[in-house]
Structures are given as structure tokens and as C-alpha cells.
Image (cartoon, rainbow, N blue to C red):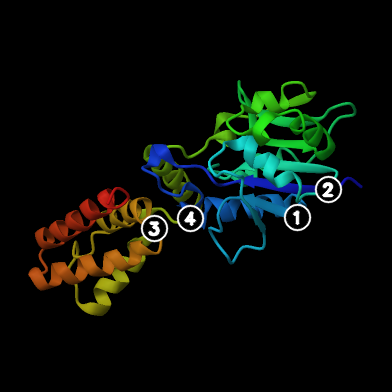
Amino acid sequence: MVSVDAILLAGGRGSRVDGAVKPLFEVGGSTLLAAAVDAVRAAEARRVVVVAPVLDASLDVEWVREDPPFGGPVAAVVAALSTVDADDVYVVACDLAAPAAAVRRLTDPLPPGADGACLDDGRRQWLIGRYRTAALRAAASGLADGGRDASMRALLGALVITPLAASDTVTRDVDTWDDLRRARGGAMTENRTLPSEALNDWSAALAERFGLAEGDIPISLVLDLARDVANGVARPAAPLSAFVAGLVAGRAGGSPADTEAAVAAVVEMARGWEHR
């Protein structure tokens, strides 16, 4: 039985998101980092090593740091190699939008004669791979300065790496604020189980119970508010924001126009929240 550990890369600068800590971005109710940890655990990784400062002390992982920090992904892999001891090791970047789907493609044993395998969506995705630990160590031993600022090709180019075809949906990562919005929108679509029309009966029951008129409960408006707040702030903020919008609208008079104005104000805040 081949044993597997995991090296998760989570210590980048986040320069394209204004220095924000990308692994702590929440998508689908989990941070990207926690989702990556769950993905490699589900793929039977025994030991999970995260190369980063301690970002979430609640995670059952080991933390290491390349020296000096921000030396690039190769330096991060080299820093973690002394901590892993399994036959193979997953190497996964913690900015993947859907790490579970990506890591599942790596769970098959490596082919005989191969030093590793990585996903390929038309381009080799070195940072979504499974490699023989001994081969990585041998390749790393030939790098100067602990691999600082080296390319992944410099580390892996001389190894026999099997490409695993994958769609760009599986390999998509979160590099920019637009990427984050798209990832969150996709997660909401995947998790949504009720179409708005399914709420009509519940809305009618609420209206009857509280003496509301038809049209007093703007279902689409409220759902759109929840979507925008969940995408721009966090999913738990959506029901809270809906409550606040209703409170503000009620205090303003409670007309449909008051409701629309309150919802618009909350949505405007949510859309600018990530850039505050």
C-alpha cells in the first residue's frame, strides 16, 4: 500500500487581491484553505503540511515556512519536504476554487516509471500534482538557495511527470477579486436547492398569518439581496442583511419603494465590502 502525505501552498503575497490572504477567502461555506485540507484528507493523506504562517489554528495540520518568506512555490515545497515521509506527496496550491474535484483526479497510484502526475488543462498544472517524495527530494537537492524564486519547471522538468487531462473548471483558481466573485457565484448555484417559485406557498402563508397584502413580500428582491451579500461579504451575512433591510424599510414607512431603497442600500454596501 503506497502512503501519501500532502504539501499545501498557502503563503503567497496575494498581490492581485491587494495583499489579502487568499487561502482564507470563503467559498461555499468553507475557506479555500480548509477546503484544500478536507480534499487531501479525503484522498487519504496521512500528514498535511501547510507552508504559510499559521492562518487557522483550528486545522489539524503542520505549519512550516520557507526561509526567507515569499520565496515562491518551489522554496515552499523544499521547506516542507523535510516534514513529510510518505512514499508519495500531494502538492496543492490553496487558491483552488474547487480543490476536492481537483485532488480526486490524483488519487490513483502513479504509473510504473513515473515520478509524478499533475493535472493538465492544456497547460501543466504543476501545483495540482502527486509526486514520488524521493524524486522530489532528489530534484530539490540540485537547486541553489533552497529553490528560492525558482520555477516549478526547474524543480520538475527533469522528472517523468504524467499529465492528467482536466477541464479548466477543475483547475480554476482564485487570483483576482473577479475570480472570487465567480467562485462564490458558482458555489451558490451548486448549493441552491429551491427555485424562487417554490417559496410562493410559504410567502402566501406568511402574508395570511401577519395580515400582509399581496406584493408586500418581494421574493425575488430578497433573494437577489441574499445572493449579492453572500458573494460580497459572507453567506451568514445574507439573512442578517435581509433582516436589517426589512427593519430599515419598516422604519421608513414600509412601502414597496421603501423596501427597494433599503435593499439597494444594503446591496451597494455589499458590493464594495471586499475592497474596503
Identify the residue position indicated by label 3 in the image.
234
Q: Amino acid at mark 1?
A: Arg
Q: CA distance from mark 3 to mark 1?
A: 30 Å
For the residues carrying marks 3 and 1, which lies nearer the camera in this image?
1
Kindly report the distance in space between the C-alpha atoms of the residues bearing marks 3 and 2.
37 Å
In the figure, is residue 46 to the left or right of 39? right
Q: Give the mark, 4 or 3, whose residue is nearer the N terminus.
A: 4
**Which is more toward the observer, 254 or 177?**
177
The mark nearer the N terminus, 4 or 1, is: 1
Judged from the image, the secondary structure of the residue bearing numbered disc 3 is loop
Q: Quadrant of residue 141?
A: top right
Is label 4 in a helix, a strand or a loop?
A: loop
3 or 2: tag closer to the N-terminus: 2
Q: Nearer the viewer, residue 115 or 153?
A: 153
Q: Residue at x 66, y 24 (%)?
A: 153
Residue 75 drawn at (x, y percent): 63, 38
Q: CA distance from mark 4 to mark 3?
A: 19 Å
Q: Amino acid at mark 4?
A: Thr
Q: CA distance from mark 4 to mark 1?
A: 35 Å
Name the residue beneath numbered marker 2: 86
- Residue named by callout 4: 193
Q: Position of residue 197 (x, y in %)?
A: 36, 55
Which residue matches tag 1? 47
- Reply above or below: 274 against 159: below
Q: Mark 1 or mark 2, which has the lower sequence index?
A: 1
Residue 122 x/y as whole percent: 61, 20
What percent of the width, then of the height, locates residue 157?
A: 72, 21
Which numbered circle lies on residue 267? Answer: none
Residue in the image at 37% along x and 38% along y: 178
Residue located 13% across and 57% down the image:
261
Q: Secondary structure at mark 2?
A: loop
